[in-house]
Image (cartoon, rainbow, N blue to C red):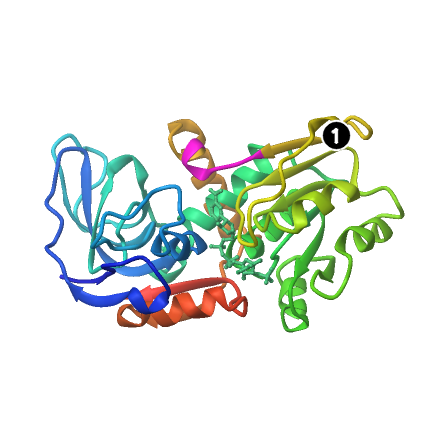
């Protein structure tokens, strides 16, 4: 099969289209013929050898895909060949992906393969940030960093659907209108403005109840200054670098809460994982959540797609088509 392979860690240019064997079916696994493959910021870190998992060179990036079930392994009873699905897995930048059966999610008829590939990582991350790590409710103000990005676009809509007021941050004015279209009540350009100061002003000095931060450096420490009493900051990534170590005594003054989130924690708990899937598809059916595919590339152009994501110009979800 055709697959993206990299033999050394490095810049986008290490990603090359090559040939790899179709993965061999094993018990409790599902073989998917990919129709669309989701690109995640984490893939750029994996390519650089800076992700939580190290590549086994030569390796293939990719954490999710959507397609049609080709075959199921022994012990898989609930998914039949021919079913349209999306899944979380590994090495998905390829024509086929072998994934664990418990990470396969059948797609509603109304959800396209492209939307399906945009769903598993970013949508479930946004859902669990707002409804598992935090109980987002009407009257709260949620600040979403990198609001026009993949997770950001989804998180703003899920926060709005929960009745919250949303403040988004973006790094360029070109992204402002899009952030507004996808749920931001106010947008701050955090490259040109002091976002913490702006957020304070937008909340009449009270501060925000929740911050979703996958930038880390320099946003995380600054964010603590614009949290409301009992406010909560969740760190779930470090696109800008790891934040400085936290002095917990600094949280006393406003009784603040800081937590971290990794999707693998939620997706390993079956009831919680299923709840995130069901609730997110429900929001899509109700028209409250629209997945934005910002750009789609042929599989062979994975390097170009990574370059675009790292340029900070991309919006919504980037997709590869095998
Ligand atoms: N913990 C988890 O389980 C989990 C799951 C999914 C994603 N994440 C994290 O969530 C974040 C968003 O992921 P995504 O896949 O949806 O990507 P994305 O938002 O589409 O792209 C990353 C965004 O990060 C922002 N950014 C800020 N500083 C940056 C820097 N120094 N270099 C490059 N980009 C920078 C950029 O937006 P602006 O320039 O507008 O800020 C960029 O568009 C990533 O940090 C990712 O690691 C975590």
Q: Would residue 102 appear left or right of 178 to someone viewing this image?
A: left
Residue 280 on image: x %, y %: 49, 44
Crowd band around label 1 with a 10 angstrom C-alpha radius: few (<14), some (14–19), many (20+): some
Please state the extent of the stretch shown in magenta in the rendering: 260-265
Residue 110 visible (yes or no)? no
Residues 171 and 142: in front is 171
138 is higher (above) or lower (below) than 62: above
Q: Which residue is mark 1?
A: 251
Q: Residue at x 86, y 52 (%)?
A: 201
Q: Residue at x 45, y 38 (%)?
A: 263
Q: Would residue 159 appear left or right of 114 to someone viewing this image?
A: right
Q: Residue at x 41, y 59 (%)?
A: 115
Q: Quadrant of residue 224?
A: top right
Quadrant that contains the C terminus:
bottom left
285 in magenta? no
254 is higher (above) or lower (below) than 238: above
Residue 2 on image: x %, y %: 17, 64
Residue 202 on image: x %, y %: 83, 53
Residue 181 visible (yes or no)? yes
The image shows a total of numbered marks equal to 1
């Amino acid at each position: 099969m055709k697959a993206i392979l990299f033999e050394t860690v490095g810049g986008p240019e290490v990603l090359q289209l090559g040939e790899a064997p179709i993965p061999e079916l094993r018990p409790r696994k599902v073989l998917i013929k990919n129709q669309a493959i989701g690109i995640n910021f984490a893939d750029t870190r994996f390519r650089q050898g800076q992700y939580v998992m190290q590549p086994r060179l030569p390796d293939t990036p990719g954490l999710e895909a959507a397609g049609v079930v080709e075959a199921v392994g022994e012990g898989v009873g609930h998914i039949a060949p021919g079913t349209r699905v999306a899944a979380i897995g590994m090495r998905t930048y390829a024509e086929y992906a072998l994934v664990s059966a418990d990470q396969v999610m059948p797609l509603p008829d109304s959800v396209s393969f492209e939307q399906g590939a945009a769903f598993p990582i970013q949508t479930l991350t946004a859902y669990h940030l707002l409804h598992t790590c935090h109980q987002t409710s009407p009257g709260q103000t949620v600040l979403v960093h990198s609001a026009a990005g993949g997770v950001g676009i989804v998180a703003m809509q899920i926060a709005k659907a929960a009745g919250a007021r949303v403040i988004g941050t973006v790094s360029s004015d070109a992204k402002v209108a899009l952030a507004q279209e996808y749920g931001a009540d106010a947008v701050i350009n955090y490259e040109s403005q002091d976002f913490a100061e702006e957020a304070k002003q937008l909340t009449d000095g009270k501060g925000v109840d929740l911050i979703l931060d996958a930038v880390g450096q320099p946003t995380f420490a600054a964010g603590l200054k614009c949290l409301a009493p009992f406010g909560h900051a969740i760190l779930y990534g470090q696109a800008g670098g790891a934040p400085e170590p936290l002095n917990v005594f600094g949280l006393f003054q406003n009784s603040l809460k800081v937590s971290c989130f990794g999707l693998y924690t939620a997706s390993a708990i079956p009831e919680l994982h299923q709840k995130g899937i069901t609730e997110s598809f429900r929001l899509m059916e109700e028209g409250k959540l629209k997945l934005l595919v910002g750009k789609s590339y042929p599989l062979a152009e994975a390097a170009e797609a990574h370059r675009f994501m790292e340029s900070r110009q991309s919006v919504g979800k980037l997709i590869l088509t095998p």
